[in-house]
Amino acid sequence: MSESEVLPMPSVKTISTFTLLSTTVMWNMAYGATHMFSIPAGTVPEALSAFQKQSGVGVVAKGRDFQNVRVSAIHGMMDDREALQKLLAGTPLQVKAPGNGSTLIVSKKPDAKLVQQGVNDVEGLFVTGHRRSQSEKRNSNIIMDTVAYDPFENLGGVSSVAQSLIQLPGVTGITDGDEPRYVSIRGISPELNHTTMDGITMATVGENGGSGSRKVNLQNVPSEMTSRTNIYKSFTAEQEGDAIGGDIDMVPMSAFDHKGLYKFIDAYGIWSSKRGGVGANGLKGYDPHMGQGAKGTFSDTFGKNKQFGIVLSMRYQHRVRNTTKQWQNYAYEGTDGKYQTNATKLNDWTGRIKPSTFSVGEYANAVTNLGGSGRLEWKPNRNMYMSLMGWSYTRWEHSVMDSEDNVLVNETPGTLGNDATQHGYKNNIKRRQDQWHRQNSGIIGHFDWHQGKHHLIARAGYTMESYNNYEPYLGVITTKLSGVVDGYNGYPNSDDMYNFDYQSKPNIDKIAHWLLNPGYINQTWEQSWQHVPTARLDYDWNTGEHDRGFGMATGFEWREMTMSYQKERLDYAIGNNVTFDKNNLIFSDRTPWLSNFPKTFIGLDGYSFPWSSLTVDGKKSAYDSRSADYKYREDIYDGYLSLHYALKHTVFIAGVRVDGTSYTGWTPLVDNAAGTASSDYVKHPGGYNRPLPSFDVVHHFAQGFNLHASYSQTIGRAAPGQIAQARNENCGDANDTGGTSCSISQGNPNLKPRLSNNFDISVDKWFNRGNGLFSVAFFSKWIKNDILTSRSIYEQDGSTYQISTPMNSKSADVKGVEVNMFNRNMHLFSQIIDAQANVTWMQGHESYSGTIGASSTPVVFKVNKMLYQPQFIANGMLTWHIPQIKGALRATVNYSGKYYTSFGTRPAFSSGFDKFMTFNLGFWHEVYPGITLKYEVMNLANYQPTYLTGDHLQFAHERDNYGRAVYFHVIFH
């Protein structure tokens, strides 16, 4: 059947199906006659139907040209062709000369980018993807944002989904070093997003395997797997109910997105400016600056009628990400005049602090990404589609941490003086080596059928993520530093820390007597995995964009999640008097960033260290190993019914989703006082059933205005580790954030799921033929039983320990306003400009139980923020397409205000992340047909992460330096 169609005159019902029919309508009047026209704004089928009735003129069009296109109203007496041209003004459609003297022809205008002589073919190809994303947002019944995959505009060699999402309004990138790893939506923890690939839930083991977090690591999902990624911010019954922040759905790339063969191959080199400990730490095999990568995507259709499609993508990257970090830990003055580093001993805090430890760390780190994906598709006709997709991506990190602690005081109360000098207590030198390995894989089957007003989608999939790591840890410690005085100046704020600038014996490392540190002589093996099989069936009737009257959608989903974490650790019976040979120390002349003293390294390689020569502490090893193990299983049964009623310009949606969840956690029985953990598991079952109602209304005004209003209830599940974990200790911090020597996390089997009442209103104004948008959105979330991380700190043997425990808060809420504006395809002096800017303001509250005073009296604390909720977010993007060189210049800026990552059992011990900005710049140009060079500078402004502490996050206690990264690409397309 030809795609060229003629619109019949009689009925709007016929118009709604004219993309499938082809008929011929003759002139009823002579061409060029004038008539009185009164055609309201609406869809193209509706408008052309009215045009034909009022003029008697037939119209030939291709159905695919006007999908998701809306027209403005026209009124008045005018020539028929003039009226049709005016009706289609501002759309991507045009009126051609009469065909065979009997009809008018409507066709799509040539794309402005494609007709430009200076825009390469791949850039033109992805204009369609951007327009599809914009059209999907414009016609959605849900408040959503979307970002299209574009191989040129996605900056960064990794070009992950996380990197692309942070350009959207209300989205904050939660960084892993110098790259976003997770995203927070509207100030809600990444734990509370639901992330899917083609509607199938993504498995995740969380941040470091043992945490069992629900955060999905989007840093390891390459954007070339997708055609676009949608974030749904309001909820009907048809969306996943376990998302308080938002539903993130990655839409896989399809071979039918492109005509014929598509290929894109990118080979690139990477230069990273930070050297870290490479070259000074005595270890070989780590590059100071250089890395490389390659990625490619291919798609094509085949078969007699091009009914089959195939998409293949692959990537490899080896990148150096060396680092220098500075930590400071503080002692807090109580109202009794004594300074405490132990939260449980602190009397009411006066607000004054003193430094207790100065630490510096030099890191050598190499990150390798490798993997690929494939999708086989079958589209035998317009009504049916099937696909099978699979992927597997892995990420290795080989990291060396070399840190040194200058401990000023011990844990004895009141040992701090009143001046800017303190007596040295101990020095620790540590080397921790890691071989982190994370792999994410999945397979998804998809069946899509529609006939008339009926639409059925069946999907089944299996996703998994695994994590393992081997970590040898070496540590040495001085005896008490008799007569050593450490001096410092300044006072910490959110940007600076104390400046450690004086030591009475600057050569103390060389003359001190060193011992093996029993707290840091161990080997650890970790492994965890999570498997998530999912099956879902979705059906809707009469809910399409052009359907009117009553409609309905219904569906069912089953999902099972199983997770296991196992840890083996060998601790050694070192005692407190085993001398360490100073010949195995490296007294370098390297002075790290922000430091005033040369760095001392342990000169031994933990992988080849003679561990067998040491005596294993069997009891401690068994406790540290067994106490961390846990298993978790969760079964979810969801069903929903959603009723639609569509008027010409208004859609009402009311529905309910019923979420049934049962879970079981298995943990060892731990006796912390005796230092023992059982060999058997203790079972912790639980479950809940929640009806989740929702109501949504959308009204399409004239002139491109849309109004959305929504109310919904959603839930937030506790993470597996929050329920099932008994005790897990990581010394050195798996992510090296927080400024403490060791972190101890433990679960809480009594946690309740969160319940959120969500209110959303948005107004959108579309312009520039659908390429431009100005929108304002208001949101408010009232959360019952929010789950937050309680943090307490204490010091022991010169090491600082952070204990993290999840607990339900008393109450929580967040509200905010998003303002977003973008405009693509703006023409200025023969150039093409794309621009986007958005800002988000938020205000939150959290009430939780803590303690105050030396008696640990319970009290409710109130904080004017939720976890991961900054007060202000701003993102911007500008792309200048330069026809003369078939290239473009692109700049992106992302800014986030500071936010809490945990609340202290006493507010003074809360922690968070400081305000942060990234500025990335990319430039590309075609040097030969099909060959383009691209250059990128990441973190051009050299803004570096800072971590904060204090009841108002007023003190910096860690600053990191990752430097900048420069990419040079050679692209074949």
Image (cartoon, grey):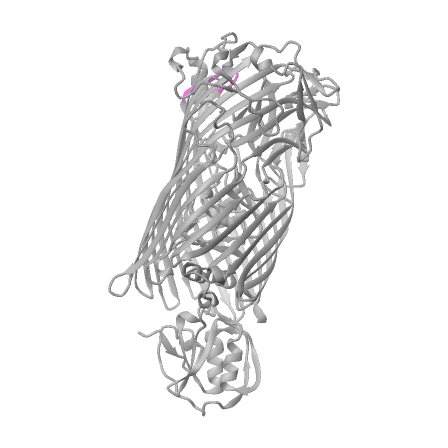
Which residue in the rendered view is the most extreme toward the left? 304
Q: Quadrant of the N terminus?
A: bottom left
512 relative to 612 in the view: left or right = right
In percent of width and height, residue 240 lies at: 47, 50
* Residue in the image at 50% along x and 57% along y: 888
Q: Quadrant of the C terminus?
A: bottom left
In this view, the residue in front, 823 or 380, is: 823
Percent coordinates x, y for residue 82 in the rendering: 52, 83
User: Is residue 472 in view?
Assistant: yes
- Tell me if residue 358 comes above or below residue 889 in the rendering: above
Q: Is residue 25 above or below residue 540?
A: below
Whether residue 581 sits left or right of residue 794 in the image: it is: left
Residue 616 found in image quarter: top left
Of 631 and 327, which appears nearest the observer? 327
Q: Is residue 10 something one can see in this rendering?
A: no
Q: Is residue 673 magenta?
A: yes
> Magenta residues?
671-679
Position above or below: 192 against 575: below
Q: Quadrant of residue 912?
A: top right
User: Does residue 911 show up magenta in the picture?
Assistant: no
- Residue 609 pos. (x, y %): 41, 17
Tally of marks: 0
Q: Which residue is rendered at x = 56% and y = 68% of the image?
A: 704
Residue visible at 36% across and 83% down in the picture: 24
Q: Position of residue 550 (x, y in %)?
A: 47, 67
